[in-house]
Amino acid sequence: MSNKWRIIIMRTSGILMPISSLPSPYGIGTMGKEARRFVDFLEKGGQTYWQILPICPTSYGDSPYQSFSSFAGNPYFIDLELLCKDKLLTKIECESYKWGKKPQYIDYGIMYVNRYDLLKKAYDRFKKNVPADYDDFCKNEAEWLDEYTLFMALKDANGGVAWSEWDEDLKFRKPEAIEAAREKYNDDINFYKMLQYLFFKQWTALKAYANDKGIRIIGDVPIYVAMDSADVWANPTQFYLDEELNPIEVAGCPPDAFSADGQLWGNPLFRWDVMKKDKYTWWTKRISAMAKLYDIVRIDHFRGFDSFYAIPAKNDTAKNGVWKEGPGMDLFNELEKKLGKLPIIVEDLGFLTPSVKKLLKDSGFPGMKVIQFAFDSREDSDYLPHNYPTHCVVYTGTHDNDTVMGWMKTAPKESVKFAKDYLNLTKEEGYNWGMMRAAWSSVADMAIVPMQDLLGLDSKARINIPSTTGGNWQWRATPEQIDNKLAKKLHRCMEMYARLREEPEAEESDAETEDKKTASKKTCAKKTSAK
């Protein structure tokens, strides 16, 4: 695996920018012209990668890491202007809704009400002129699409409550009840199928545009899924649930220096013993689907495959959890056997035991380094650039970190002083540019910086504060922030640190090849004569 990866990622760079954070007149970033303009910006900036956050439908809390489905696309990302071109909506209709007062932030409350109301207008027109490839899409994706769309239709019919609170026959998926529901809610099911058709149509076109420009997309795959999801409802035996289909233990992180109570994520845990017996079929389907969506897959919380923290589901903190053994290389060997060698990055942050480090080495996947984590002055750190191996991906920060400019104000004074001394950070250069310089100049094969760091934004542009609800996942860029001047400056940095995207060589005609051979012979003849 590692040899294959060396070829893919050697001295490259990219930008972390969620689709939701792109500029848009309609409340949230989408897969339309601003996404293409961002791809153009990456191309001009000499970048190779666009890293995004999960693109699945968000549930309570608006986190892309808590989704109603691991396979579906987020309807919010469907571009309204493209729907106008398809005559499914009109510009007047799009502008008749309120999309929030602040263009720098997403108002998810408004989005939930208005976006779906508008998309239902599109559905009324879609039904009258169904595209020729719609039925093929539904058949090709039926394995997850049928369950997800029924799940969403039933959620609507039940006032949005979790599936664990539905009627017993639907909760336990009694065949007669499921069949009756499919018939009763057929129109609602088809509405959600249309949304997925439109999402994947637009996503496929956007990805093709990016790839044609030499930009490859890194997509994020959370290790865990939400309890209130089609994944768990349709596959309860794959998760650690009791006879009443309630979680027995849930996921999280133990207490540490940053959190006295630990982190209680609440996701149901996998029954790895059951998954092993069926050769990890669910995981194979999931990674296979993600490999089709993205050029490179980033797997979140990699250490959970070595050992995972299990917390009693009834607890209200993460204090009383225990560590349990994960599937280890058995899972990844099975995935490679079925899917071949896939380009994968893994998030291996936090306290790493020897067994986690061994799993990373055995897998051959590159792990992550985050520069913000490097400056605890009490000890040497693997996150300091002079300790990096080449086979890794370095970030200034991730979606869970403050921005560099925010970190400079909020981190402990001794840590900030250490960073300034170690990286020679100055106000004249810009603290954000100094920290990005450290990433780009390091030996790491790949360097990724969040867009907020490139723009030099403070804590107001932070994406997420872990273990908090409300106020997260909201930041958006404005159109004037993403300009050619910034792209040119970025391109110069890529030249300086040998991270420019490699352009594919154009194929030469036979005549051009012959002309070059002739010119080469003449040059050699002149040199020989001169001697």
Image (spheres, rainbow, N blue to C red):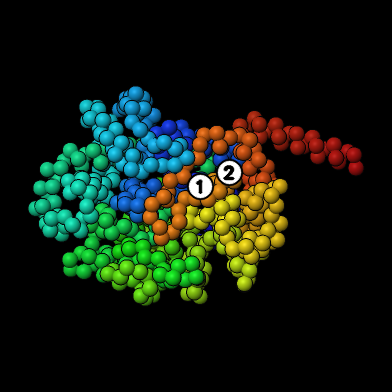
C-beta proximity under 8 Å, tags 1 and 2: yes
In the picture provided, is 182 more to the left or to the right than 72?
left
Q: Tell me if I can see residue 324 in this picture.
A: no
Q: In the depicted view, which residue is nearer to us: 230 or 5?
A: 230
Residue 154 as seen in the image, left or right of residue 276: left
Give the alpha-carbon distance from disc 1 to disc 2, as whole Å: 10 Å
Q: Residue at x 20, y 64 (%)?
A: 245
The residue that label 1 is drawn on is: 461
Amino acid residing under circle 1? Ala
Outermost residue on the right side: it is 531
**Which tag, 1 or 2, sits closer to the chain's start?**
2
Q: Position of residue 367 (x, y in %)?
A: 52, 62
Q: Nearer the viewer, residue 267 or 160?
A: 160
Residue at 66% over, 63% down: 418
Query: Can residue 527 be seen here?
Result: yes
Q: Residue at x 52, y 42 (%)?
A: 215
In the depicted view, which residue is nearer to us: 152 or 330?
Answer: 152
Question: SS at mark 2?
Answer: helix
Per the rendering, the mark at residue 46 is: none
Provide the secondary structure element on which disc 1 rests. helix
Locate residue 484, reporting x and y percent: 61, 34
Q: Quadrant of the C terminus?
A: top right
Q: Residue at x 27, y 56 (%)?
A: 228
Horizontally, residue 37 falls left or right of residue 223, namely: right
**Circle 2 residues within 10 Å: few <14, some 14–19, many ≥20:** some
Circle 2 residue: 455
In the rendered image of this protein, does residue 242 appear above or below residue 435? below
Q: From the image, state whether disc 1 or disc 2 is nearer to you.
A: 1
Residue 85, given in percent of the width and then of the height, sits at 37, 25
What number of labels is visible?
2
